[in-house]
Amino acid sequence: MKGKTLGLTPILILLLQSTLVLCRIAFEKLTDVDFQGTAYYTVRNLSLYECQGWCREEPDCQAAAFSFVLNPLTPVQETRCLLQNDTQANNPMASPQRSVNTYYMVKLQVRTESVCLRPWAFERVPGKALRGLDNTIIYTSTKEACLAACLNEKKFPCRSVEYEYGGMRCSLSDSDRRTGQHFVQLVDTPGTDYFENLCLKATQACKGPRVFTAPRVGVAEDKVSQYAGLHYYTDKELQVTSESACRLACEIESEFLCRSFLYLGAPHSSTYNCRLYHLDHHTLPDGPSAYLNAERPLIDDGEPIGKYFENFCEKPSANSNPSGELPVTIEHQQDLNMASNLTRNDANCDKTGTCYDVSVLCKDTRIAVQIRTNKPFNGRIYALGRSETCNIDVVNSDQFKLDLTMAGQDCNTQIKTHGGGKETGVYSNTVVLQHHSVVMTKADKIYRVKCTYDMTSKNITFGMVPIRDPEMISITAAPEAPPPRIRILDGRQREVETVRIGDRLTFRIEIPGDTPYGIFARSCVAMAKDSKSTFQIIDEKGCPVDPSIFPAFIPDGNALQSEYEAFRFTESYGVIFQCNVKYCLGPCEPAVCEWGRESIESWGRKRRSLPVNETDEAGTQEEDMNISQEILVLDFGDERQSTDFLRSDKPGGVASEANFGEKTVTIVEPCPSKGSVLLLGVACALLVLLYIATIFCYYMRKWLAPPKHL
């Protein structure tokens, strides 16, 4: 018995360790398909990653359907994000619907520590399998356990998974649709789904060398490029100086697994000429035949179609690069400026074979320059002209960072201004990567770093511009404006959803505290739930319409707030607040509002006045963002009830319901109906009659009883 107990001890320890691993949130993505589900929120003109981020943060969100279409008049991609709190995607028997230009993302709970920080961990193809290339077969009770096994696999890079729901069969493979090339294709397999691991590093995407070429699919290259420009969602846009720089950006991309890129030709002005995609023709449900159905754009704006390249996995060779090493692309060509006729044309690689992946992170008070190299670096990095006050020493490291302060003279960060001395929000500096501790050599690198703070949301971009040896590389970054939100707080600073008329409330518009932006609000309206009645509380200038009902906004850190007393509309309990929010760099200036004989300040606009030319320039940079918040306002004596759901908005009866934005709130009316009053009256009458009959029977029995004789 003792031996059996000792034999069970390791098993119990393993079970205990497995329970200690917490579930991590991950996503699987499906391309050009959609599943039925219950939608509870719809947002337009968000980016793909903002849509996925909303679903990640929302506890009720189970899936997000992101769709986009190219508006030929702008031309920009107009998007729609649909959040679902219930989805058929988790039902193995459900059949997806084809939907063009749609990415469907399903939230997963995966019990592993190996989940990557990328937007989605797996690409799912329902009803398909890649037969004959299995490395390991295991049996798991759930799909999530199978995906976790792939992420935890150490013996080989797990590139794909097949899960058979009926037999609970989990097949792990080091091959996928690209490593198998044209010899192996997906086959229809009902009851089985195919998954590709997107948490792999770029160097693990292929068994052999990973190269980028024009897809050899039997379709003209310009037709493929045109389809990619119209129907591929642009994950990141950059400005580069050459095709090789665009290729390098795709090779070293770490935020997502870059499968293809579109190079639009030589740069001109400040437009982006390099687009990175997570898609290739293998990802499309129709494969290469999708390119044949590409339609011409409605309006030809004369812009170049560009050259499209996607990754291709070559056969592995004996001297292939080890896993984990950064890919290095070397081009040999004639260089008229150098004595040697063999030079590296890559702006990010030096003559020693060291390549630098430089990125910029724009903060509110500093610029963070992050560097990764494919070889350990020894030397120092510093701001040009401030080598003693703004520097770090690097000792045998392939990852390091330099923080450039934006204020003061320690790092000599320059601020671009207009002719009148007004700051434009553009901060720049020059960074030197120097191998030797004292002298600069031709192997060193010089980078021009720039952060642009404006009122639009942009992807982080960089451009590579070799000037001389040491080469000068320009890097530009623009931090995204954070999404604002409305919070309504009570006197104890607790967020509330149901209040009574006259309650003292605090109306707050907030953005995260670690952003360099300030906000200002205007054109705020209060609406009834049925949208039949509206009342403007803040006008288009940012001034309160009636301060006695809703006072002016005042700043509170990065937030705006106004204290008011709860009100509601006559025909509706639900009140919807909607505001137009814009951004400015740093604190925003207040608007001076006239109310009677008084002048008040309200933080409802960016500036008091601007010259005509500056106003036009600012207008081209600003971007509106509308936000809304709902609150339920009850009368005195009403009972609060915010968890039940009804299907009528007609007053009277026992309860009433109000719908807005696919949310439902139930209100229990305190007044009884006529039927209930009548029923109560009948019941009381019966009780009185019963009481009288009881008394009557008691005295009659006592009176008829014969007297007792002693």
Image (cartoon, helix red, strand yellow):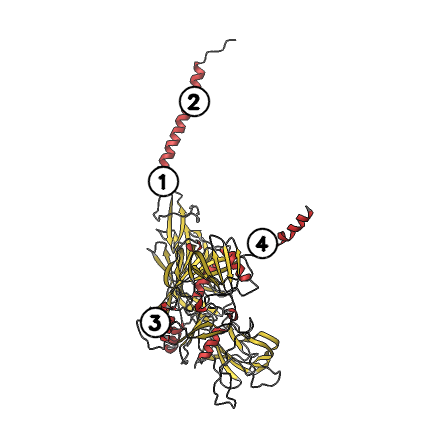
Q: Amino acid at mark 4?
A: Thr
Q: Are marks 4 and 1 in contact (CB under 8 Å)?
A: no
**Callout 3: few (<14), some (14-19), or many (20+) C-alpha neighbours within 10 Å?**
few
Q: Which residue is mark 4?
A: 19
Q: Residue furthest bottom?
A: 339
Q: Amino acid at mark 1?
A: Ser
Residue 673 is marked as 1
Spatial separation of the CA atoms under disc 4 and disc 2: 70 Å
Q: Are marks 1 and 2 in contact (CB under 8 Å)?
A: no
Find residue 597 and report its horizontal and vertical position in percent: 39, 65
The answer to which of marks 4 and 3 sits earlier in the sequence is 4
Q: Which residue is mark 3?
A: 74
Find residue 240 and report its horizontal and vertical position in percent: 45, 78
**Callout 4: few (<14), some (14-19), or many (20+) C-alpha neighbours within 10 Å?**
few
Spatial separation of the CA atoms under disc 3 and disc 2: 89 Å
The answer to which of marks 4 and 2 sits earlier in the sequence is 4
Nearest to viewer (mark 3 / mark 1): 3
Task: Answer with the quarter of the image where residue 305 lies.
Answer: bottom left
Give the camera-side residue of 655 and 72.
72
Q: Amino acid at mark 2?
A: Ile
